[in-house]
Image (cartoon, coloured by chain):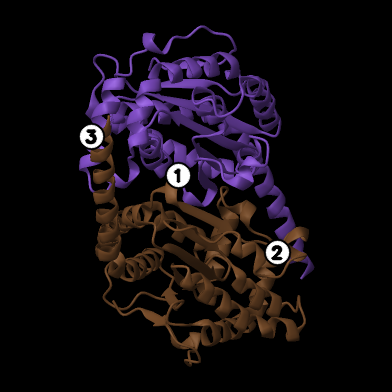
Chain colours: A brown, B purple
Amino acid sequence: MDIRTINKQNEKLRLDDISPEPPAGTDKEEAKRQLEVLGEELFDLQDLLWGARMNAVLIVLQGRDTAGKDGTIKHVAGFLNPRGLSVTSFGVPTPEELEHDFLWRVHRATPRKGEFAIFNRSHYEDVLVSRVKGLVPESLWKERYDHIRDFEELLTEHGTIILKFFLHISLEEQEERLLAREKEPRKAWKISAGDWEDRAHWKDYTQAYEEVFARTSTKNAPWTIVPANSKWYRNLVVAHTLVETLRPYRDAWQGKLDEVGQEKKKELAAWRKGK
Amino acid sequence: MDIRTINKQNEKLRLDDISPEPPAGTDKEEAKRQLEVLGEELFDLQDLLWGARMNAVLIVLQGRDTAGKDGTIKHVAGFLNPRGLSVTSFGVPTPEELEHDFLWRVHRATPRKGEFAIFNRSHYEDVLVSRVKGLVPESLWKERYDHIRDFEELLTEHGTIILKFFLHISLEEQEERLLAREKEPRKAWKISAGDWEDRAHWKDYTQAYEEVFARTSTKNAPWTIVPANSKWYRNLVVAHTLVETLRPYRDAWQGKLDEVGQEKKKELAAWRKGK
């Protein structure tokens, strides 16, 4: 698969140059089969991660309204054992959150070793909506890119594997999805006039996202641009990226588990002998 | 299904009178099919709960070592959308937790409206292990039953639907599972001599659990005794109890969603008119 992942700073990327559609020739049924296979491997990797307790996994999901953040959680994170998984949605900050720096609330939600955490929106909103809507002075949000890189480096040093996904949809696809939401009784509660009004800022958000990619893509905390106009392709790209990122850790995790298992065996043998 | 749920105080119940095996004539393959059907209904109910934001669901899982708490989470909670689900495992209290009352750490993990929370062990350990091992004076743990009932009543008044499950296995089944764990490289890290030593306290735990059922079973926070020697039957009983408990809320949740949807429609129509 030709997946666009940015793993260094200042790489020039224009979102308009990247198609939100699946590449020509990608087959939906085949993609769904692949997703199932990847899901099983993901579940297995999580089991090793959980036992080995050497690393944690942080998945950041960003995207415009209706880009499919919830759907990705359902269809990709749905493969994981919920025991070792937390999902945190970051909405409009509460008064208490506003009395802290912008990283405070996300730091509390980072995964402990052995666990997955998914951020449904994240600290990136503080250089996206805060910038586009002018919620904070420019002098403030401009400082945040460096803080974000430092923060993510701290997590990496602790053993956290970071994956950041931008779910990329088109303006037309968003319109269709908003209209569909209005008509769907189960989803109508999600929508407001504000969602429609936000569309006037489409280009401002594009620009803000492009700066995010340029300034916060690093080797250990890369951004992946996910063509997300088709849900089945979006799920496949996220699952594929996740498995490809975690697979190289398999041997180390397995090795640690074996080691701990041997120690436990000795411990139990000694205990039985001493009884 | 003949499920043993205790929904009032002081009901006499002896664990030894309840078989941990599936009832005669229960078919494993049929049970697995039923579980799938229940899982779909559970997922659907969660979707309504999430949108309606009228209630929360708290599931307490208790049981002896190897009773299958983790497996229940994987196989039953695995049907849920992880977005609206938190799983909290309560182990040996940390120094910070010990500086608070025993309900402090569990209170923080209770679900907000729209969400499911699962407690893997819970505040009940404070009248189980604390009592059996004499970790706190009798005068202290004896007070806790009343505090637990009051606490659960508080949650109920806030709209939290509480289900408490005791996963019931036999002494022989536990021995088999502990031996299997030792041999399974992926699971050996879970075991310690303490797990074997704890078996000497089997009857003390039985007695402590019987007092828990007698003193903390209420209409709104009932205990269900789950025959758990067979994993497939255990999963079915938990899923069935969960769905039966939540199903009566369906109309209210759907009604609320419809109402909110109508309001949104009006709001959007007014906004379009005003543009």
Labels 2 and 3 in the same subunit? yes
Work out whether mark 2 precedes mark 3 in sequence or the reverse, and give the earlier one: 2
Q: Residue at x 49, y 58 (%)?
A: A112
Which element carries disc 2, helix, strand or loop? helix
Residue type at tag 1: Leu
Indicate left or right for B157 with A146 as reference: right
User: CB under 8 Å between callouts 1 and 3?
Assistant: no
Location of residue B201 in the rendering, given as x and y in whole percent from the top left corner: 40, 21
Q: What secondary structure is found at the residue carrying circle 3?
A: helix
Measure the alpha-carbon separation of dots 2 and 3. 72 Å
> Crowding near pointer 1: few (<14 within 10 Å), some, many (20+)?
many
Name the residue at 69% across, 80% down: A131
Q: Residue at x 42, y 82 (%)?
A: A219
Q: Residue furthest top?
A: B12
Q: What residue is disc 1 on?
A: B80
CA–CA distance in space, label 2 to label 1: 30 Å
Of discs 1 and 3, which sits in the foreground?
3
Q: Name the residue carrying label 3.
A: A273
Q: Amino acid at mark 3?
A: Lys
**Looking at the image, is mark 2 or mark 3 nearer the viewer?**
3
* Quadrant of res A226: bottom left
Decide: is A259 above or below B159.
Answer: below
Identified by mark 2, the residue type is: Ala
> What kind of element bears circle 1?
loop
Q: Residue furthest left?
A: B183
Q: Which residue is mark 2?
A: A193
The image's mark for residue B172 is none
Q: Are marks 2 and 1 on the same chain?
A: no
The image quadrant where one finds the C terminus of chain A is top left
* Image height of B227 relative to A114, above or below: above
